[in-house]
Image (cartoon, rainbow, N blue to C red):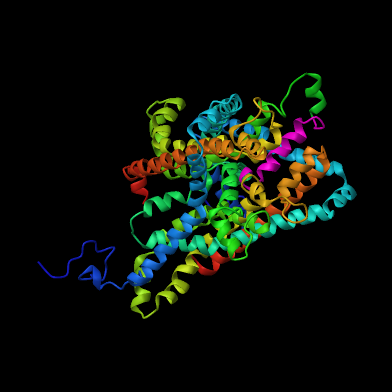
C-alpha cells in the first residue's frame, strides 16, 4: 500500500528561480529531457485514454455532486446540514471510525512487528489472512460479523456475559470498522519495519538499551510516519464504509445510524438534495482529514529524518 | 582456517564468532511466545472468526437446502449479473490502468502528480457517494434524467448504472499496482527496442507487458474481487429488482432482510470462497512476481 498520494503534490518546483539565466538553462535542459523522453510512441493515445475515462467515470460524476449541492443554495444547505439527524449520523460515522482506527494503530503495529521479528509455524497463513478484509465482499463481512458479535454469536454472547453489548449499537459499528481497517495499518507499516536494519537494534542493545527503550528510540520513530498513514487510510475507509456496517449497526436513527446509510435513506425518499448535502459534507470532511494527517505525517518524517 | 569467519562482510562487519553471540532481539522465549500467541489470537479473533462463521452456517444447513438455494432462479440471475459486471469492469480497468501506467512512467509532463492523485480519488470516496453521483446524473430527477427518459434509455436501476458504479470504485486498482512496478523497470529496454526498429505496439507486447505481467495480474485480481463483491455503490444504483438488477452481494442482503438467514449465508459462502481463491492466487502471484523481479537484471543494477 503506497502512502496517500492524493495530497503529495510537491510544494516547490525543482527549477530554481534565483536568476534569469539559470531559469533559461534549466528550462532548456528540461525541454531536451522532455523531447528525449517522448521518443517512446503512444503519449497522446495513452494520456487520451486516461483523461477521457477519468473524466467520464470519476471527475464529471463527482462534479455533478458539487453542482447539485450548489443548486441547493447556502440556506438550504445549512438547513439540511444542521438538522439533528444529519449531525448525529456524521458524528456516529466519524466517532466510530476514529475509535476503530485508534484501536487498529497499536494492534496493527504489534501484528506487523511480530510477523517481521519472529519465525513460527503458521506465520505465512496469518500473514496472508491479514488481506481477507480487502478480498471479502463487505456484505458478507457484514452478515458474518453480525452472526459472530450478535447476542447469540460466539463472541457476542461472551461479551454479553461481561455486560458489553457488541451489536446493534455504536460498539458494533466500531467492531465492523476494526475488521475493515486492520489491513490498512498492517500493510502500510510492514514495508517500513522490514527496512529497519537489524544492526541498528543490535547496536542499541550492545550500548545497554533495554528492548523497550530500543523500541521507543529506534523502531517507533522510524515507523511513525507510516503508522500515521495507515491510521489515516483506516479512518478514511471507515467513514465511508457501508456494507460491513449496516448489518451489525442496528441502524437506529440518532443512535447507530451512519452517514452513508442516511444518504441511502434520503435517496429512497427521493430527497436528492438531502442526499447531496450529506455526500458533500462527507467528501469535504474526509479530504480535510486526509490533508491534515498528511501534513502531520510529513512533519513526523522531517523530525525523525527517515526517508 | 581461522576461527572468525565472515560470511558476508557487509552484513556482518564486526564478525560475530557464532550467531548466538549476537545480542538477542527477540526478548527470550517467554516474551516471544507471548507476543506470537497474542498476534495469532488477534488475527484469528478479528479477521478469521467472521470467515469461519460463514462456512459454519453453511455446514449446519442440509444438502437439500444448499442445492435449492444455489439453483434458485434469483440466485442464478444474481450470479450471471455479477459475472457480467466483472466481465465489463475488469478488462476496462485493465486497459485504463495500462494506459495510465504507460503515460505516467514513460513520459515527463506537467501535472503528472496531479493526475496520479486524481486516479486515486475513488479510494477516498465512500462507495455510497460513488453510487449517489450517478443517481444525480442519470436518475429520474438527475441532470440527464428527463432526456434519458424521453429517449427510453435506462441507466439507473439497470445494468449500465451498476457497471458504471463498479468502474468508479475499481478505477485505481490496476494503475496503482502497475505504476510503481513500471517506474522501477525504467524505460531503457523500451528505448533500446525502438532504436532497433521495433514499433510501439511491439515494444508494449514484447517488452513492457512481459516484464509487468505479474503486477498487471495482481491488479486485475484485486479489481475482480472488488467488482464481484462491491455492495455500497451498486446498492444505490441497482434498485434491488430481483432477477434483474440484483448482484450476488445484493442478493445476500435481500435474503438476509427477508429473514432467510440460511439461504443468505449459503450465497455469502460463494462470495467468501471467491475471497479465499483471490487470497491464494494473490499469494501465488506475489511469490512468482518476486522471483521474476529477483532475476530482472535492470532492477539488480539499480539496487
Q: Is residue B28 above or below residue B110?
A: below
Q: From the image, which quarter does the N terminus of chain B lie in?
A: bottom left
B9 displayed left or right of B276: left
Q: Nearer the viewer, residue A117 or A1?
A: A117
Across the whole image, how many numbered discs are drawn on residues?
Answer: 0
Q: Quadrant of residue B100?
A: top right
Residue B179 in the image, given as x and y percentages of width and height: 50, 42
A13 displayed left or right of B196: right
Q: Is residue B101 visible?
A: no
Q: Nearer the viewer, residue B205 or B221?
A: B221
Tell me which residue sits at (68%, 53%) in the image.
A286
Tell me which residue sits at (40%, 78%) in the image.
A210
Tell me which residue sits at (43%, 32%) in the image.
B209
Q: Residue furthest left?
A: B1
Tell me which residue sits at (70%, 42%) in the image.
B129
B124 displayed left or right of B13: right
Residue A192: in magenta span: no
Q: Residue furthest top?
A: B151
Residue B303 in the image, given as x and y percentages of width and height: 36, 52
Residue B72 in the image, given as x and y percentages of width and height: 57, 26
The magenta segment? B122-143
Residue B135: in magenta span: yes
Main secondary-structure element of the magenta-colored stretch: helix
Q: Is residue A30 visible?
A: yes
B301 displayed left or right of B158: left
Q: Nearer the viewer, residue A182 or B262?
A: B262
Amino acid at each position: 500500500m503506497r502512502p496517500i498520494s492524493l495530497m503529495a503534490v510537491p510544494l516547490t518546483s525543482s527549477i530554481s528561480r534565483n536568476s534569469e539565466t539559470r531559469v533559461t538553462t534549466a528550462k532548456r535542459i528540461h525541454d531536451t529531457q522532455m523531447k528525449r523522453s517522448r521518443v517512446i510512441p503512444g503519449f497522446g493515445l495513452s494520456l487520451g485514454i486516461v483523461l477521457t475515462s477519468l473524466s467520464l467515470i470519476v471527475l464529471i460524476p463527482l462534479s455533478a455532486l458539487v453542482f447539485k449541492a450548489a443548486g441547493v443554495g447556502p440556506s438550504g444547505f445549512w438547513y439540511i446540514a444542521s438538522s439533528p439527524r444529519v449531525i448525529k449520523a456524521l458524528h456516529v460515522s466519524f466517532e466510530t471510525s476514529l475509535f476503530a482506527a485508534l484501536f487498529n494503530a497499536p494492534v496493527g503495529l504489534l501484528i506487523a512487528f511480530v510477523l517481521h521479528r519472529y519465525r513460527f509455524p503458521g506465520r505465512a497463513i496469518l500473514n496472508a489472512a491479514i488481506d481477507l478484509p480487502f478480498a471479502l465482499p463487505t456484505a458478507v463481512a457484514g452478515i458474518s460479523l453480525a452472526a459472530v458479535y450478535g447476542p447469540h454469536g460466539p463472541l457476542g454472547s461472551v461479551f454479553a456475559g461481561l455486560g458489553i453489548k457488541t451489536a446493534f449499537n455504536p460498539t458494533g459499528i466500531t467492531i465492523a470498522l476494526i475488521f475493515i481497517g486492520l489491513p490498512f495499518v498492517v500493510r502500510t507499516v510492514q514495508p517500513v519495519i522490514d527496512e529497519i536494519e537489524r544492526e541498528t537494534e543490535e547496536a542499541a542493545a550492545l550500548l545497554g538499551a533495554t528492548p523497550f527503550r530500543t523500541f521507543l528510540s529506534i523502531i517507533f520513530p522510524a515507523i511513525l510516519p507510516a503508522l500515521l498513514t495507515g491510521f489515516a487510510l483506516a479512518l478514511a475507509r471507515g467513514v465511508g464504509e457501508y456494507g460491513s456496517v449496516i448489518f451489525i449497526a442496528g441502524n437506529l436513527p440518532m443512535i447507530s445510524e451512519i452517514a452513508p446509510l442516511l444518504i441511502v435513506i434520503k435517496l429512497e425518499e427521493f430527497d436528492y438534495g438531502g442526499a447531496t448535502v450529506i455526500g458533500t459534507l462527507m467528501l469535504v470532511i474526509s479530504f480535510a482529514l486526509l490533508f491534515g494527517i498528511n501534513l502531520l505525517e510529513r512533519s513526523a518524517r522531517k523530525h525523525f529524518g527517515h526517508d | 582456517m581461522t576461527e572468525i569467519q565472515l560470511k558476508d562482510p557487509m552484513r556482518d562487519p564486526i564478525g560475530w564468532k557464532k550467531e548466538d553471540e549476537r545480542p538477542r532481539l527477540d526478548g527470550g522465549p517467554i516474551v516471544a511466545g507471548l507476543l506470537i500467541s497474542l498476534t495469532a489470537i488477534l488475527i484469528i479473533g478479528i479477521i478469521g472468526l467472521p470467515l469461519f462463521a460463514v462456512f459454519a452456517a453453511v455446514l449446519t444447513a442440509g444438502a437439500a437446502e444448499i442445492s435449492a438455494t444455489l439453483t434458485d432462479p434469483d440466485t442464478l440471475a444474481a450470479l450471471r449479473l455479477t459475472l457480467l459486471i466483472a466481465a465489463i469492469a475488469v478488462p476496462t480497468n485493465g486497459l485504463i490502468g495500462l494506459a495510465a501506467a504507460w503515460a505516467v512512467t514513460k513520459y515527463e509532463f506537467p501535472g503528472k502528480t496531479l493526475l496520479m492523485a486524481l486516479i486515486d480519488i475513488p479510494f477516498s470516496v465512500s462507495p455510497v457517494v460513488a453510487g449517489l453521483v450517478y443517481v444525480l446524473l442519470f436518475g429520474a430527477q438527475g441532470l440527464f434524467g428527463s432526456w434519458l427518459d424521453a429517449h427510453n434509455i435506462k441507466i439507473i436501476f439497470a445494468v449500465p448504472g451498476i457497471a458504471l458504479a463498479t468502474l468508479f470504485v475499481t478505477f485505481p486498482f490496476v494503475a496503482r499496482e502497475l505504476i510503481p512496478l513500471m517506474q522501477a523497470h525504467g524505460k531503457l529496454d523500451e528505448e533500446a527496442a525502438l532504436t532497433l526498429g521495433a514499433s510501439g505496439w511491439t515494444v508494449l507486447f514484447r517488452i513492457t507487458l512481459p516484464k509487468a505481467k505479474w503486477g498487471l495480474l495482481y491488479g486485475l485480481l484485486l479489481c475482480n474481487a472488488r467488482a464481484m463483491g462491491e455492495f455500497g455503490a451498486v446498492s444505490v444504483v441497482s434498485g434491488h429488482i430481483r432477477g434483474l438488477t440484483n448482484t450476488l452481494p445484493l442478493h445476500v442482503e435481500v435474503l438476509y432482510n427477508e429473514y432467510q438467514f440460511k439461504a443468505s449465508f449459503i450465497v455469502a459462502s460463494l462470495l467468501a470462497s471467491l475471497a479465499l481463491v483471490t487470497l491464494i492466487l494473490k499469494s501465488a502471484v506475489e511469490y512468482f512476481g518476486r522471483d521474476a523481479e529477483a532475476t530482472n537484471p535492470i532492477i539488480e543494477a539499480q539496487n
